[in-house]
């Protein structure tokens, strides 16, 4: 089962330019039918606090794009976008589409990043999302969620064994990014795929370093600082067999 991370320089508040960049990136990569293609947080706009400007209309252009890519490559697609709530605040979300172009779920970021003022503009979610992909139970989360292991434990108890983490994670904390993704893989005996962006926006520089870890914490793929796709062929038995052999999850007290 092919797991793919796509990192690129997100053009600020410019949907069409970002759609074109992704199309070009994917056209240069060998994608197997049935793959899971993962795009960054707010992949069509950048990490903007201008909710009114970047929020999706109805129907959503960004969701239509995700559905188009899913159908074109006969794969699942996952990426981040913004909706505006009735009170004017934003909802930092991700949506997932299957190979038929049908949306199978969406998730609202549970932890908005107060350090940068995200929580002043966006409302935190409460629920998790689980969906089935090629024998995996997938639980995607968004950026700052990575710092909260209790969210991952809650998801593992619900059956998760693969965690996509989509992000706009700045270069000043890139070591935290890689370290926490590895830790979440080891402690939950699960695959993690962290998908970051590169380039810069009006406030931050971004280092890429998208990465895939297996349930042992072994690094399967690591991107550098440029636009690219990385991938790994993964199998659910890797997590299942390790969990059966080393029963640490059974000793949880939460």
Image (spheres, grey):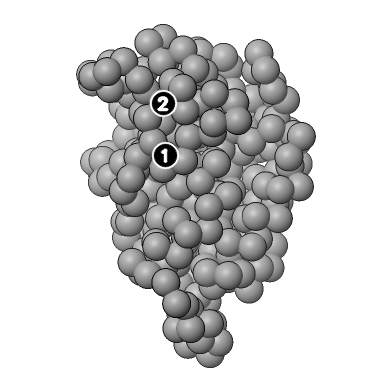
Observer-nearest residue: 136 or 176?
A: 176
Above or below residue 229? Residue 171 is above
- Image side of residue 193 versus residue 210, left or right: left
Question: Seen in the image, is 133 located left or right of residue 5?
Answer: left
Tag 1 and tag 2, C-beta contact below 8 Å? yes
**Which percent across, then down, holds residue 117?**
54, 23
In the rendered image, is residue 167 in sight?
yes
Could you say which quadrant of the image residue 11 lies in?
top right
The residue at the point 45 percent across, 47 percent down is 141
* Quadrant placement of the C terminus: bottom left
Task: For label 1, count other residues whose C-alpha is less than 10 Å away and answer few (under 14), some (14-19) or many (20+).
Answer: many
- Residue 12 drawn above or below residue 213: above
Occupied quadrant, residue 151: bottom left
Spatial CA span between label 1 and label 2: 9 Å
Question: Vertical placement of 246 versus 141: above or below?
Answer: below
Q: Residue at coordinates 31% horizontally, 41% vertically from top-left?
A: 106
Q: Position of residue 96 (x, y in %)?
A: 34, 43
Residue placed most toward the observer, 233 or 73: 233
Q: Is residue 4 visible?
A: no
Residue positioned 37% across, 23% down in the render: 90
Residue situated in front as seen by the camera: 218 or 102? 218
Q: Which residue is mark 2?
A: 122
Q: Residue at x 59, y 26 (%)?
A: 116
* Label 1: which secondary element: loop
Residue 163, horizontal then vertical, whole percent: 48, 56
Badge 1 is on which residue? 109
């Amino acid at each position: 089962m092919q797991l793919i991370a796509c990192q690129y320089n997100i053009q600020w508040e410019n949907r069409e330019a970002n759609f074109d960049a992704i199309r070009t990136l994917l056209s240069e990569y060998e994608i197997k039918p049935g793959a899971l293609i993962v795009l960054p947080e707010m992949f069509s706009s950048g990490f903007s606090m201008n909710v009114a400007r970047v929020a999706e209309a109805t129907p959503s252009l960004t969701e239509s794009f995700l559905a188009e890519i899913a159908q074109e490559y006969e794969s699942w697609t996952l990426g981040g976008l913004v909706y505006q709530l009735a009170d004017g605040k934003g909802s930092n979300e991700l949506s997932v589409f299957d190979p038929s172009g049908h949306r199978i779920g969406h998730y609202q970021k549970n932890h908005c990043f107060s350090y940068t003022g995200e929580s002043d503009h966006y409302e935190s979610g409460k629920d998790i999302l689980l969906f089935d992909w090629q024998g995996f139970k997938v639980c995607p989360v968004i950026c700052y969620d990575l710092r909260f292991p209790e969210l991952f434990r809650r998801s593992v108890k619900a059956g998760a064994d693969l965690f996509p983490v989509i992000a706009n994670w700045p270069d000043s904390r890139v070591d935290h990014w890689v370290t926490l993704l590895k830790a979440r893989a080891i402690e939950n005996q699960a695959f993690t795929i962290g998908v970051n962006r590169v380039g810069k926006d009006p406030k931050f520089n971004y280092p890429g370093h998208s990465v895939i870890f297996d349930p042992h914490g072994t690094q399967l793929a690591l991107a550098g600082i440029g636009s690219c796709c990385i991938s790994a062929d993964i199998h659910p038995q890797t997590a299942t067999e390790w969990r059966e052999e080393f029963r640490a999850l059974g000793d949880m007290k939460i």
